[in-house]
Structures are given as C-alpha cells and as structure tokens.
Image: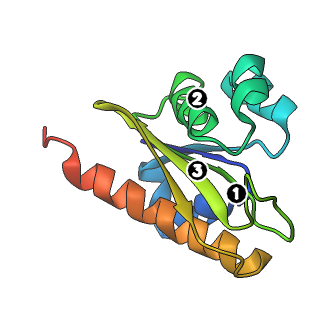
C-alpha cells in the first residue's frame, strides 16, 4: 500500500494515483500538509526541523515520508515539499522541490531544481517526478 505526503502539489500525486482504475488495491491514503502546522500535526514533522531547515528541505521531506508511513497502514510513501512560485529567494529559489521516499529500505531524499517554469509547470513536474520515484521504489521491492 502507498501513502502520499504532499505540500506544494496539494494532492496532485494522490489524484494521479487514484485516477487509475483499481487504485484502491494499492493506495492507502494521502496527506495534504500545505502549512507547517499541518506537517507537524498530521505527519509528526518536528518544529526543530522546520526552524533549522525550513519547510523546503530534505530534512522535512524525510520526516514527511516517514510520517506518512507512521500515520498510515502503507508500506511505501512519497513526500514532496517545495516552492512552486511565483517567488522564492536566492537561498530557496522558485522551482526547488525536495522529495522523500520511505519504505522497507529506509528513507531516501533528493532535491530537484525544476527552475522558474511557472507555478503550474513546477507542480506538474513535481507530481510526475514523485510518480517516477514511486515507480522506481516499487520496482526495487523484493517479490514475496
């Protein structure tokens, strides 16, 4: 079973997964945690991580992915948190998205710089990248 923990995409990954017939056999739940408070309340993201690293960080993506497993019956999760735009800063530019994938092998994180493509394009690219990460993680799972 799969769970999603989404910030900047606000449920787009969960929607893409559930667009497929039969998705109830593999999709357990989705968490939309747009605010920092929601990240903490729903996924257990620590205030310490949010203060030290900010919401758009691999540390927070890691805690979101792990929290999605901890607060669900899923065995695999994907998380994403980023800056879709407009805006951003020199330190955290528009188009930066941090991803996490949690499963039997632990949690893996990565950051992708999509660039200032515009809000819709960044969100779509982040959704597609998250789906690719899920696919890769599923292919790496040992067969029972």
Residue 121 horizontal/vertical position (percent) = 68, 80
Sooner in the amino-acid sequence: mark 3 or mark 1: 1
Residue 117, x across and y down, in percent:
70, 81
- Residue 5 percent across, percent down from the top left: 62, 43
Q: How far apart are labels 2 and 3 at the CA level?
A: 11 Å
- State the residue at coordinates (53%, 61%): 112
Q: Residues within 10 Å of mark 1 (few under 14, many from 20)?
A: some
Q: Would you name the residue on which mark 2 appears?
A: 63
Alpha-carbon span between mark 3 and mark 1: 16 Å
Closest to the observer: 49 or 24?
A: 49
Quarter location, residue 90: bottom right
For residue 11, which numbered disc appears in the image?
A: 1
Quarter of the figure that contains the N terminus: top left
User: Mark 3 sits on what residue?
Assistant: 98
Give the label, 3 or 1, closer to the camera.
Answer: 3
Quadrant of the image containing the C terminus: top left
C-beta proximity under 8 Å, tags 2 and 3: no
Mark 2 crowd level (few <14, some 14–19, many ≥20, 10 Å Cα): many
Left or right: residue 71 versus residue 73 is right
- Indicate the quadrant where residue 115 lies: bottom right
Give me the residue at 76% from left, 80% from top. 118
Mark closer to the chain start, 1 or 2: 1
Q: Residue furthest front?
A: 90
SS for callout 2: helix
The one of 55 and 10 positioned closer to us in this rendering: 55
Q: Is residue 19 visible?
A: no
Q: Secondary structure at mark 3?
A: strand
Q: Secondary structure at mark 1?
A: loop
Residues at circles 3 and 1 in contact by the CB criterion of under 8 Å: no
Q: Is residue 82 above or below residue 122?
A: above
Look at the image and tell me whether residue 7 can be seen: yes
């Amino acid at each position: 079973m799969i769970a999603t923990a989404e910030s900047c995409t606000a449920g787009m990954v969960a929607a893409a997964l559930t667009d497929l017939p039969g998705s109830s056999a593999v999709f357990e739940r989705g968490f939309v945690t747009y605010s920092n408070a929601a990240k903490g309340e729903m996924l257990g993201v620590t205030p310490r991580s949010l203060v030290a690293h900010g919401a758009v960080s691999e540390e927070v993506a890691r805690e979101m992915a792990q929290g999605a497993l901890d607060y669900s019956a899923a065995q695999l999760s994907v998380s994403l948190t980023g800056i879709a735009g407009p805006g951003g800063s020199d330190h955290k530019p528009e188009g930066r998205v941090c991803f996490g994938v949690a499963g039997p092998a632990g949690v893996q994180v990565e950051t992708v710089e999509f660039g200032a493509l515009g809000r819709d394009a960044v969100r779509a690219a982040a959704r597609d990248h998250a789906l690719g990460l899920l696919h890769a993680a599923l292919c790496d799972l040992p067969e029972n």
